[in-house]
Image (cartoon, coloured by chain):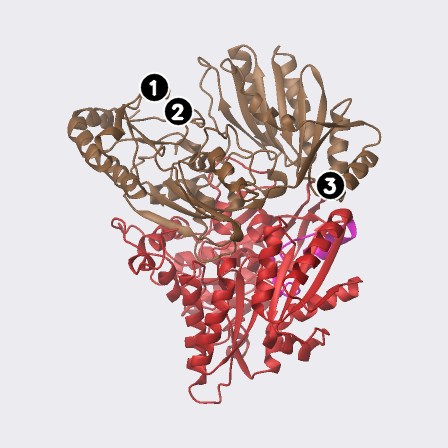
């Protein structure tokens, strides 16, 4: 906790707030409502710039005044990462919500950071296109927020994550620089790939103000099938059979829980003829298990982990695709002797989301044990949500030998530690 | 570099791993772009990560700039040596370290050839997707440096899509690991920044690749059109119909003539050829190929051929993949350009290329990845005719300026290297370039790893930039900031 700059912020406040009002207009500087608390740190004001230039100027002003800035889109993932060590100003992209250019014939879109995923998808769908990403809470989550948190869903298996879909980006740096990289074309190797650096940086290097994405056509037809497997071993066999086949599935996930047999869901997209043929092949491939067609709502399973989850822990974990069953088996073992209820959604990529319900002590020790087990086999566990009152737990876990380099990158982009101080890995 | 340092380097790589004689050094004075040449002081051929690390430690201590090099097939001077520097050739580090089929991963050393990865896994029906035309000779390490593409990246993505992790020797000699076999490890995506950094951030000594299952069915169609305009319209029609082919390539008449003369691909004689490849489940491909055929016909295609065998399909591709070299049949000298435009600007740009070509009195053959707007105009000239070489260079640059003005890029897959660094400030503003170089300052504060490449002006690490400065195109009112 840096008390010196907090006190500086308070004494400098009236003059500073006046400067902020001059930049963004009086109506766009407000006191923060009480729901935005970050552990110990409590930002006092929220600022909503109306343009990229305004945002960059606000950022520079805050940086010079020694204020800690928490960039914010729809606010759906503000609790991700560690609690910031300082928080003075909530920098909202709410007014930067324009879809600047949807060049449907080029399959690209340029969009401001504060635009919600849903608004973007609605616009794109008018030309039969989509951003091939199924993010959490699309009605509220914004482009900038999803990029910064690197959220991705089941479509990742086929289309990659945002890192693979973003082709250009403009960012504001704490010193007021507005910098663009990439471009508006799908294929482009001019200069460093900063959009990838920003994706998943949780707003600790700069604030994304706009992004350009490559798009994909909306499928003509989509069908979902589910295989009910007796146990995890059978699930892994089903996963492997499908992954190792020539089926052109778009997504595949495993749903598992302490009180139910695991299910493997497969999504196909394409033409009627193509899908009929694939259905036949899938059923032949998985002849030992019951395969049925089910409604697409099953792809919401990941988001549903968050339902009434105040007292639960929710984590994202990563394992090798061939180790998915082992990973879930570890969850079962770790949870069982602690009386923890659990539910997991794991994608065929090896990325999984896990919800644990139990006592605070048990959750804490279970998460530590799970993380150690996953890290031992080259995986990772990132804590996304924890119940209030749980003992301190690093959100990220082991970063490896590139941490000093990550610190050097942070030093170059944000030397004063203005953006999201302490929220990222290794205290960044 | 004095004798003491040479002795030290020889001790690291052994006698056979150090080249210092001028005759042998000549091989390394340029890459695939031969009009830039610099003699290195020495070439080192390490065969292990430990040797790379030891060499880089010496370079760091003695402030000797170094350039890593694979097969030297790059077309932008990325592997061009730097004055008073050494070249570190990775060709001896050519082992495939691990093939992990259940996880679809292959781990390689940087000197492994691109095509060798596919060869190693093809019996199990997997392949490595990025397929630059030089894939039988270029290395994975070089592909990582350049973020190489290829004809099939429209559907499958670029090198960066297929690199999951890297072991890297940083310019200070330390060894670090970026990314890994699993996805989304905690921390910044530094592997994503390293790929495509053209050797300026360090040397990759181990690369974790993702491989892809071969599709059930591949079909390739060749359609002849009166001109590139109709071929371009057919591509638009295919996109509008909601299809994402594995590849879409256009060649203009001059490029067709060249390919025909060189490899006898038996192409129809026409104004423009469109090659469309679809892959996936058989029923899906067949249904979509019917649609593609209809779209081509509706856009005025006079002749449509669907490859009936793998041999015929290979022949369709052979003409396209050999087009660069084939142009040598039409002209003693030529410049291969690599620009990108938004695909819809294609007709406009081709007319412009035609116009500026006529003005310069030079012929331009066009080959392009039509799906993603990546053009490869080939500017033909004869350097024995006084004035033609500079005129060709000027024309080639003019074409890039047209690409930038159309909202595109100065390079889609060949890289900036030495060749295009001056063009960078036409595409990006000073703050844009400065921000990129902050990354360089974090990785390589002494600027020893392939210095002088990519950026028109090096950034002094620690320099403090100013506020927003408009991009030159914005000032000129040509383009809005994207």
Q: Name the residue under label 3.
A: A272
- Give me the chain that's brown: A
Give the residue displayed 41% in from the left and 69% down from the top: B84
Q: Is residue B388 above or below residue B244?
A: below
Drawing shade for chain B: red
Label 1 with label 2: CB-CB less than 8 Å: yes
Which structural element holds mark 3?
Answer: helix
Q: Does B158 lie within the magenta span?
A: no
Q: Do labels 3 and 2 share a chain?
A: yes
Q: Which chain carries label 2?
A: A
Residue A232 spot, x, y in % from top left: 73, 25
A36 and B454: which is toward the camera: A36
Question: Which residue, given by chain and number where applicable, does mark 1 sit on?
Answer: A40
Highlighted magenta segment, given as a residue range: B116-140
Establish if B293 lies above or below A83: below
Q: Which of marks 1 and 3 is in front?
A: 3
Which residue is label 2 attached to? A83
Verify CB contact (< 8 Å) between mark 1 and mark 3.
Answer: no
């Amino acid at each position: 906790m840096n008390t010196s700059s907090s006190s500086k912020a308070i004494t400098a406040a009236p003059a500073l707030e006046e400067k902020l009002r001059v930049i963004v207009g009086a109506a766009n500087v407000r006191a923060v409502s009480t729901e935005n608390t970050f552990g110990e740190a409590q930002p006092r004001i929220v600022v909503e710039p109306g343009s990229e230039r305004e945002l960059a100027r606000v950022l520079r002003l805050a940086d010079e005044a020694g204020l800690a800035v928490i960039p914010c889109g729809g606010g759906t993932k503000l609790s991700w990462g560690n609690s910031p060590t300082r928080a003075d100003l909530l920098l909202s992209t709410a007014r930067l919500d324009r879809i600047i250019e949807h060049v449907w014939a080029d399959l690209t879109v340029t969009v401001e950071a504060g635009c919600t995923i849903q608004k973007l998808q609605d616009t794109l769908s008018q030309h039969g296109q989509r951003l091939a990403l199924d993010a959490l809470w699309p009605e509220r989550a914004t482009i900038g927020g999803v990029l910064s948190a690197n959220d991705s869903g089941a479509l990742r298996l086929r289309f990659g994550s945002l890192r693979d879909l973003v082709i250009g980006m403009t960012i504001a740096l704490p010193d007021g620089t507005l910098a663009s990289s990439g471009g508006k074309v799908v294929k482009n190797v001019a200069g460093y790939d900063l959009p990838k650096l920003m994706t998943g940086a949780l707003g600790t290097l700069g604030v994304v103000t706009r992004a350009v994405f490559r798009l994909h056509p909306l499928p003509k037809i989509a069908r979902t099938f589910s295989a009910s497997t007796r146990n995890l071993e059978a699930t892994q066999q089903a996963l492997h059979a499908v992954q190792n086949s020539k089926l052109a599935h778009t997504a595949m996930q495993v749903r598992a829980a302490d009180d139910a047999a695991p299910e493997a869901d497969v999504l196909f997209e394409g033409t009627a003829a193509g899908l009929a043929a694939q259905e036949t092949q899938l059923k032949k491939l998985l002849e030992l298990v019951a395969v049925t067609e089910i409604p697409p709502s099953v792809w919401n399973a990941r988001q549903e982990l968050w339902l009434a989850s105040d007292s639960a822990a929710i984590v994202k974990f990563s394992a090798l695709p061939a180790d998915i069953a082992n990973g879930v088996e570890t969850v079962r073992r770790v949870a069982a002797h602690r009386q923890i209820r659990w539910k997991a959604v794991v994608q065929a990529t090896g990325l999984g989301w896990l919800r644990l319900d139990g006592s605070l002590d048990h959750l804490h020790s279970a998460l530590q044990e799970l993380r150690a087990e996953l890290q031992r086999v080259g995986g990772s566990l990132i804590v996304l949500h924890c119940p209030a009152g749980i003992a301190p737990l690093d959100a990220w876990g082991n970063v490896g030998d590139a941490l000093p380099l990550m610190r050097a990158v942070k030093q170059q982009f944000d030397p004063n530690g203005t953006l999201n101080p302490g929220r990222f890995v290794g205290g960044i | 570099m004095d004798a003491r340092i040479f002795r030290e380097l020889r001790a690291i790589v052994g006698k056979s791993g150090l080249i210092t004689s001028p005759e042998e050094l000549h091989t390394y004075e340029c890459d695939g772009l031969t009009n830039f040449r610099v003699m290195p002081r020495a070439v080192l051929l390490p065969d292990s990560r430990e040797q790379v690390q030891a060499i880089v430690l010496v370079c760091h201590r003695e402030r000797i700039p170094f350039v890593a090099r694979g097969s030297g097939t790059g077309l932008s001077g990325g592997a061009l040596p730097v004055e008073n520097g050494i070249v570190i050739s990775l060709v001896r580090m050519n082992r495939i370290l691990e093939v992990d089929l259940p996880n679809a991963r292959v781990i390689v050393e940087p000197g492994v050839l691109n095509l060798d990865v596919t060869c190693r896994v093809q019996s199990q029906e997997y392949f490595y997707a990025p397929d630059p035309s030089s894939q039988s000779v270029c290395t994975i390490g070089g592909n990582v440096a350049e973020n190489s593409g290829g004809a099939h990246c429209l559907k499958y993505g670029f090198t960066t899509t297929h690199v999951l992790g890297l072991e890297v020797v940083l310019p200070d000699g330390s060894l670090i690991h970026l990314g890994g076999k699993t996805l989304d490890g905690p921390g910044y995506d530094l592997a994503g920044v390293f790929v495509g950094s053209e050797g300026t951030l360090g040397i990759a000594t181990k690369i974790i690749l993702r491989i892809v299952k071969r599709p059930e069915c591949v079909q390739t169609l060749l359609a002849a059109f009166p001109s590139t305009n109709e071929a371009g319209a057919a591509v638009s029609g295919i996109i509008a119909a909601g299809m994402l082919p594995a590849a879409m390539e256009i060649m203009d008449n001059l490029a067709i003539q060249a390919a025909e003369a060189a490899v006898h691909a038996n192409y129809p004689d026409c104004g423009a050829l469109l090659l469309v490849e679809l892959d996936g489940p058989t029923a899906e491909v067949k249904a979509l190929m019917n649609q593609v055929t209809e779209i081509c016909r509706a856009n005025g295609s006079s002749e449509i051929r669907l490859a009936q065998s793998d041999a015929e399909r290979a022949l369709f591709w052979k003409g396209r993949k050999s087009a660069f070299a084939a142009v040598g049949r039409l002209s003693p000298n030529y410049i291969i350009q690599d620009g990108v435009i938004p695909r819809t600007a294609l007709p406009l740009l081709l007319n412009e290329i035609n116009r500026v070509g006529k003005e310069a009195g030079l012929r331009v053959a066009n080959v392009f990845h039509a799906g993603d707007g990546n053009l490869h105009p080939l500017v033909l000239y004869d350097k024995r005719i006084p004035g033609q070489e500079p005129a060709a260079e000027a024309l080639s640059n003019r074409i890039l300026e047209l690409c930038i003005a159309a909202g595109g890029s100065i390079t889609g897959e060949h890289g900036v290297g030495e060749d295009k660094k001056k063009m960078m400030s036409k595409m990006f503003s000073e703050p844009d370039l400065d921000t990129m170089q902050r990354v360089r300052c974090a990785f390589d504060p002494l600027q020893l790893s392939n210095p002088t490449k990519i950026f028109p002006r090096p950034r002094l690490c620690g320099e403090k930039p100013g506020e927003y400065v408009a991009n030159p195109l914005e000032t000129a009112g040509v383009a809005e900031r994207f």
